[in-house]
Image (tube, rainbow, N blue to C red):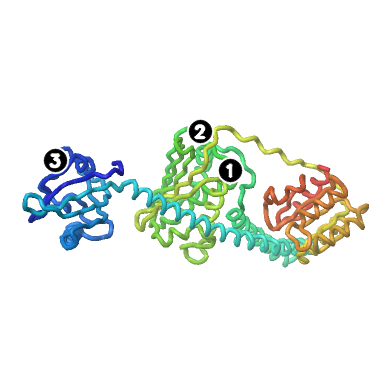
Amino acid sequence: MSSSRTHTTDYSFRTPAASVDCNPAALQILGLDDKSQLVGTWPAALSPEMQPDGQHSDDESRALGAVTLTQGAHTFDWTHHRPDGTLVPVEVSVRHANASGRRVSVVAWRDQTRRVELERERAFAQERLDLAQKMEAVGQLAGGVAHDFNNLLAAIRNAVQLALYDIPADSPVRPDLDVAIQTAERAAGLTQQLLAFSRQQPRSVTAIDLAALVRELMPLLRTSMPSNVTLRLTSQPIDGRVVADRSQLEQVILNLVLNARDAMPKGGQISLAVWVDHIRQQVMFSVADTGMGMDDATRQRIFEPFFTTKPMGSGTGLGLSVVYGVVTQAGGTVRVDSEPGRGTTMRVALPYVAAEAANEPQDPSPSLQSAHGVLLVDDESAVRTTTRRLLERNGWTVVEANNGEEGLALFQRHRSQLAIVLTDVRMPVLDGVDLARRIRDEVPGFPVVFFSGDDKLEPHDVAAVSNVPLLAKPFASAELFSVLRQALAAE
């Protein structure tokens, strides 16, 4: 790359406007070895056929020359090329002078390579900032929708489960209720993807060798390919560890590969690669397909939840949204290179780690058989009612409240009858975290379980209390009793 110092080239425009002399700096900018390569030529001959603005260099050179003749001096941007084809952006300043009775044009070039690169980097950074701000807003909306939808699913699933308890095994209605349970679980899977997109931190992070993980997934990925699609992996035995949630990272790999597969309905090749960028301290993972590619309008929207180019019923539009959410929350970036008819390459960059992360502690596995008194607090009446009925059906004694303030009053009134508190987190008047804190202030270490439409709580949300497990809605009855008994055993 040439420096950005001002280089001055002197050449005279006669008819035709050919160069008559130049200095060494001009030769350096153009990558020429000898003055004879420049003298006798005119600017358009040292330029690409088209300028960046879409004009022919020959036509634009003549037009700029006419302006200079009229004004006596002119400054403009231009692009030349070197013998090897490298384009050289320059700022051109032209002024007219008389030399030995003839009119000459004195041309000063300033190499603009660095300026153009900075502008390109600035535009790319602004594009990423705009996308990040847009995704943050969409993520907040998606997270709120997922939370509320999970509350509805919890009530639906609990009600169906209660109905199944009372229906004989040979009842013709049972298959329909089984379908309702399965459909609720599928809906819960969609909301988990929305939460994965919207959450600000990964759920359970460890140090993972990304290259090894991709190799482990190759058999599964190959079975997901039709016969007309080939899958190829390029990966050296590298130490490419990243800190991430393993299940989420598997979902990223799977989503990218399946998205590439769907972009090639007539078949083609998917190339996977994993490598380490030691300069940037990043582990890189790319998925390249030979499919139909994307235009700019599509490329700018592919990470939006529910945006899809697939036919109705062929996709949820959440796959790449999950990829974006998981990768950015792990401190990485996702880059898309695509043109119509030239396929697509998705590049994921994640921070490289040089040491193994500590293993996650194992969950306790208590085996308490007896039921206890439980204070149930939730502002959603359907969730509260169906959960209470599940608990009572299995021998638990339930005291219920519809907000944290009422729950605290009931706790103080029935403390001797209660063994544990099961409370929603987001509630008006007094939320679940404040309720747990105030209960622990009165009875240190009292067992509390949160249940929520979110499947993860941020550390700053629960900083005031500790050792409070989270039960994500919707939940199976077995999960409910297991979490309650684990909390009792821990205390």
Q: Which mark is residue 239?
A: 2
Q: Are marks 1 and 2 in contact (CB under 8 Å)?
A: no
Q: Residue at x 36, y 48 (%)?
A: 117
Where is residue 315 drawn, in percent x and y? 52, 61
The local crowd at label 1, few if under 14, some if 14 to 19, many if 20 or more residues have their Cα within 10 Å, is many
The answer to which image quadrant residue 408 occupies is bottom right
Residue type, mark 3 in image: Lys
Judging by the rendered image, the residue that carries numbered circle 1 is 244
Relative image position of residue 153 (x, y in whole percent):
69, 62
Check whether the beta carbons of the residues at disc 3 and disc 2 lie within 8 A of each other. no
Q: Nearer the viewer, mark 3 or mark 2?
A: 3
- Look at mark 3 in the image and give the residue it sits on: 35
Which of the marked residues, 3 or 1, is nearer the chain's N terminus?
Answer: 3
In the displayed structure, does residue 66 sit left or right of residue 156? left
Q: Residue at x 60, y 44 (%)?
A: 245
Q: Is residue 369 something one can see in this rendering?
A: yes
Q: Position of residue 303 (x, y in %)?
A: 50, 57
Q: Tag count in the figure?
A: 3
Disc 2 marks a residue whose amino acid type is Asp
- Distance, label 3 to label 2, CA atoms, is 52 Å
> Split into 4 quadrants, where in the image is the C terminus?
top right
Q: Secondary structure at mark 2?
A: loop
